[in-house]
Amino acid sequence: MVAVKSLVCHRDIEIALRCFPTLMRACQQPVDLVLHDDGTLTADDRERLRAVLPGVSFVEAKEADVVMEEKLKNYPWSAAFRTRNVLARKLLDVSLMSELPFCFSDSDICYIRPFSGFPETAALVFTYSNLEAYSIRPWHVGRSVAMPSRVNTGMMYVREFDLDFIEWFLSRRELQSVLRRMPFWAEQTAWAALG
């Protein structure tokens, strides 16, 4: 069975209702789908998702808040990032509340081709992007972080997650303003740096 996690929101429920069934059909192994609520899902949203995704389970935002407060109590930069950026739930909540390894899929990916299996030795596997979609530029981190090229975190396989590295990365003074200036890419930037 493949553990697949995702972060979902009320705003994108219609596309999630169309895309998640394609994931279930394309994966050549049984899927254990767990959806993390970003705090905006309604009871109706959950019922609609259950209707098209039998066996789906949910991690409610309030439940995650309690768990994550404890997990991040010694990680102030990560905790602050989580309060400022809803996509931090994708980076932190999903990773720290899941058993490794797991797959992650954004709710807006339509799967066309069948797939199965992941490399047994890779710590992280990302999909390829046709652009460099990061909050930072190479000169923001110098030689301290080697950023991989053209990472897309819409679909990824996570075998390892290093919260100490994420905390160090988010605490870098030279990154603070750029991560805030381009928050929509901050989570992807942190994943790429971890990779």
Image (cartoon, rainbow, N blue to C red):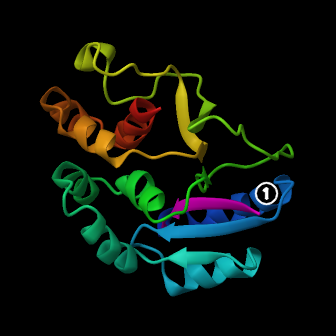
| Vertical placement of residue 124 versus 159, above or below | above
Q: Secondary structure at mark 1?
A: helix
Residue at screen point 38% across, 79% down: 63
Q: Of residues 35 and 13, which is closer to you in this image?
A: 35
Main secondary structure of the magenta stretch: strand
Residue at screen point 77% across, 48% down: 111
Viewed as shown, does residue 44 lie left or right of 21?
left
x, y percent for residue 134: 39, 29
- The quadrant the N terminus occupies is bottom right
Viewed as shown, does residue 98 lie left or right of 3?
left
The quarter of the picture where residue 137 lies is: top left
Residue at screen point 78% across, 45% down: 117
| Vertical placement of residue 58 versus 119, above or below | below
| Residue 62 in view, yes or no | yes
Residue 8 shown in magenta: yes
The amino acid at mark 1 is Thr
The quarter of the picture where residue 6 lies is: bottom right
Q: Where does the magenta region start and end?
A: 1-9
Query: What residue is disc 1 on?
Result: 22
Q: Check the image and name the residue furthest to the left.
A: 173
| Vertical placement of residue 77 versus 1, above or below | above
Viewed as shown, does residue 75 lie left or right of 13?
left
Residue 185 shown in magenta: no
x, y percent for residue 92: 38, 55
